[in-house]
Image: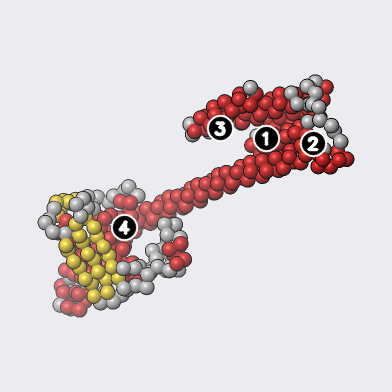
Amino acid sequence: MVVGCLAIFNVVSMLRWRTGRGVRNVELFLALLVDVAVLTVQLYLSGGSSNPFVFLYLLQIAVGAMLLRGGYIWTIVLITAVCFFVLSNHHVGLSVAHDPIQGLASPYVIGLLVCFVLNAILIVVFITRIARTLRLRDARLAAARQRATEEEHVVRMGLLASGAAHELGTPLATMAVILGDWKRDPALSGNAVLQEEVAEMQIQLQRCKTIVSDILMSAGEARGEASAETTVCEFLDSLAEEWERTRPVRTFAYENNFGADSPMVSDATLEQMVFNVLDNARDASPDWVALIAERTSTALVITVCDDGPGFSKDILARYGTPYVSSKGRPGGVSDCSSR
């Protein structure tokens, strides 16, 4: 009957565990008390403290020391000690001779050996499983702390970039006005070489302003450059033309395989994202970069190819981790692109 009640309790405990809710200390404490109570009843019916399996109390204490905290542990120690004391005076007699001198010929010694092996196996099993669970928990906590640190760093970098973008806006606007005046100045209009250099400076200045705007848009502080309605092919063609015009690359292969044109909303952030990938490919492969646009049933697929050496095993092992760079500076994009 006692063993049957313990089996029912174990089934209820298994169902409780499958709910996925956290287990509190008081629940663990009550579960250990049930085990202590069942063991006490079994020992009472089989010789009390003279039964060699009385040392199974140590298993309850060891498990409690691993799982419980504070006063619960010492309560388990006190309760098992009281049970041992009670069993010493009140129990049903066990007709087994206590003659340790006979060695393994004595049933009492055999019982002690079985109790020792049982205690050792169960302690190793329980403590190993508990230690593995604790290591997994510590690993998750360490990963969570690392993510929190990285996210905090990203936020700080974002605030710094946003502040720098605000500060750069005014001098860039001033430079744009000065370059416009130079271009219209009669004294400089006759110098073709100077006019070409001024035009190139205006292009690069406009690129700087676009980068500043993208930084502010990423921080949720757009500088007034709203999204524009366009088509997919027009967006891709203008993107490829602007990148090839503003970046020195020996061969730029552009293939627009999108097919029938479709309307879309052009966003500067999307354009800058493609530019970043193209720039990374150019750093790894200055002689050849390709941009291929294709269409699936539900999406536009943009593929950037290059003839770079590919990612090293060390970079691939840390893929997805922030601030991994092969350019020698934190936060840089790896320059080992792959086709």
Mark 4 vs 3: CB contact within 8 A: no
Tag count in the figure? 4
Residue identifier under label 4: 212
Regarding residue 43, the answer to whether it shows in the image is: yes
**In whole angstroms, how far apart are the C-alphas of marks 4 and 2?**
87 Å
Residue 243 x, y percent position in the rendering:
24, 66
Amino acid type shown at disc 2: Pro
Please give the label number shown on residue 23: 3
Q: Quadrant of residue 122?
A: top right
Which of discs 2 and 1 lies nearer the camera? The answer is 2
Q: Which amino acid type is shown beneath numbered disc 3?
A: Val
Whether residue 71 is visible here, answered yes or no, is: no
Q: Is residue 87 left or right of residue 286?
A: right
Q: CA distance from mark 4 to mark 3?
A: 52 Å
Q: Which residue is at 68% across, 43% downward?
A: 121
Earlier sequence position, callout 4 versus callout 3: 3
Spatial CA span between label 3 and label 2: 41 Å
User: Foreground residue, 11 or 145?
Assistant: 11
The image shows residue 213, relative to residue 55, as above or below, that is below
Q: Residue furthest left?
A: 260
What amino acid is labelled 4 in the image?
Val
Mark found first going from the N terminus, 3 or 1: 3
Please state if 70 lies on the left or on the right of 314 as rendered.
right
User: Residue 86: x and y, percent?
Assistant: 79, 23
Residue wearing tag 2: 107
Which numbered disc flags the more N-terminal residue, 3 or 2?
3
Instruction: Please name the residue that numbered disc 1 is placed on.
Output: 64
Helix, strand or loop at mark 1: helix
Label 3: which secondary element: loop
Compared to residue 329, the image places residue 139 above or below, namely above
